[in-house]
Amino acid sequence: MFVTSFLISLIMSKTNNFVFKSLLIVAWIIFVGLCIEAGGLIVNFLFNMFKPEFVPNLYQGLDLTQVYEDSKRAFFSIYSFILIISILKAYLFYIVVRLMHKMDLSNPFNDFVARQISQLSYYTLSIGFLSYLGRHSVKNLMHPGFDLGSLNHFWADSQAFILMGAVIYIIAVIFKKGVAIQTENELTV
Amino acid sequence: MAIIVNLDVMMATRKMSLNELSEKVDITLSNLSILKTGKAKAVRFSTLEAICCALDCQPGDILEFKPEV
C-alpha cells in the first residue's frame, strides 16, 4: 500500500519539486535494494545448480533443504517463482525511476508517460498474480510439516500488488484520455 | 478529414502573408500554420470570426466540406 500511495503522490505532485525530488531519491534507494535482492537470488540459483551444498544457505537465510531433498523439481519451481517475482519487482522500480527522470512536470500528458504508466500497471498485476500463484503452489507442493513462514517474505503482499495494479490501470486509462484531450486541445486553433 | 481549409486561397486573394494575418488576428504563426495545412482538429468561433474580419470574407470562403470516399 506504501507503493500505491507513493505512485499516486508521484502523479499528483505537479508543482512541488522538493517532494518530487525526495520521491526520486526514495525510488532509487528501493530500486537499488531490489536489484541487490534479485542479484543475490540469481547468484544463489546458479550456485545451487552446480553446488547443491549451498542449499541450506540461501539468500536472506532461506533454508529449503527439506524441499530440495524431497524433490529437486519442487525446489527449482519454488525458487523460480521467487526469482521471477524479485526480478519483476526490480524492473517495476526501474520503470518508476525512468519515468520520474524523463517526465516533465510542466507538460506531463504525453504518449511516453501514458505508456510507462500502462507498463507499471501490467507489471504490478503480474507480480500480484505470480505471488498469489506461488503462494498457493507452495501450499500444494509442500512437505507436511515444512514451515512456510520463511517464504512469506517473497509473496505475502500479493493482494496488495493486485489492488495496486488495478488502481494504476485505472489511472493509466484516465491518463491516456488526458493525453487524447491534450492532443486535441493543442490542435484546436 | 472531410473539412478543407482554404485559408491560403483567401490569403492569396487578399494578398496577405501569414505573418500579417497572424498579427491582425492575434494568433501565433504555428497555430495559423496548423490551420493552413489542415492539421487542426477544431476551430474556435472566436478564431473564425477574427480571420473572417481580417480577410473580409465569409466562413464558407475559408471552410469547405468534401465528403471522404
Image (cartoon, coloured by chain):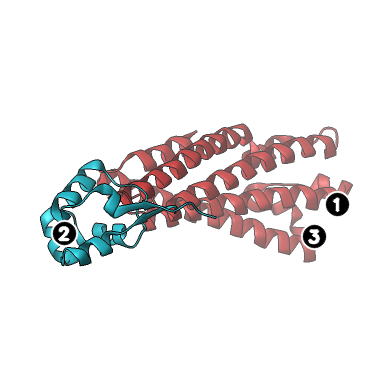
Chain colours: A red, B cyan
Name the spot of residue B58 as percent of width and height, x first: 23, 48
Residue type at tag 1:
Arg
For the point 27% across and 59% down, the residue is B7
Tag 1 near tag 2, CB within 8 Å:
no
Tag 2 near tag 3, CB within 8 Å:
no
| Closer mark to the observer between disc 1 and disc 3 | 1
Residue type at tag 2:
Ser
Q: Are marks 2 and 3 on the same chain?
A: no
The answer to whether residue B48 is visible is yes
10 Å crowding of disc 1: few (<14), some (14-19), many (20+) = few
Residue corresponding to mark 3: A52
Per the image, label 1 sits on a secondary structure element best described as helix
Residue corresponding to mark 2: B22
Residue corresponding to mark 1: A73
Per the image, label 2 sits on a secondary structure element best described as helix
Tell me the chain of label 2: B
Q: Is residue A94 left or right of residue A81?
A: left
Name the spot of residue B52 as percent of width and height, x first: 19, 50
For the point 58% across and 37% down, the residue is A161
Name the spot of residue A162 as percent of width and height, x first: 60, 35
Name the spot of residue B6 as percent of width and height, x first: 31, 59
Q: Is B63 or A15 nearer to us in this picture?
A: B63
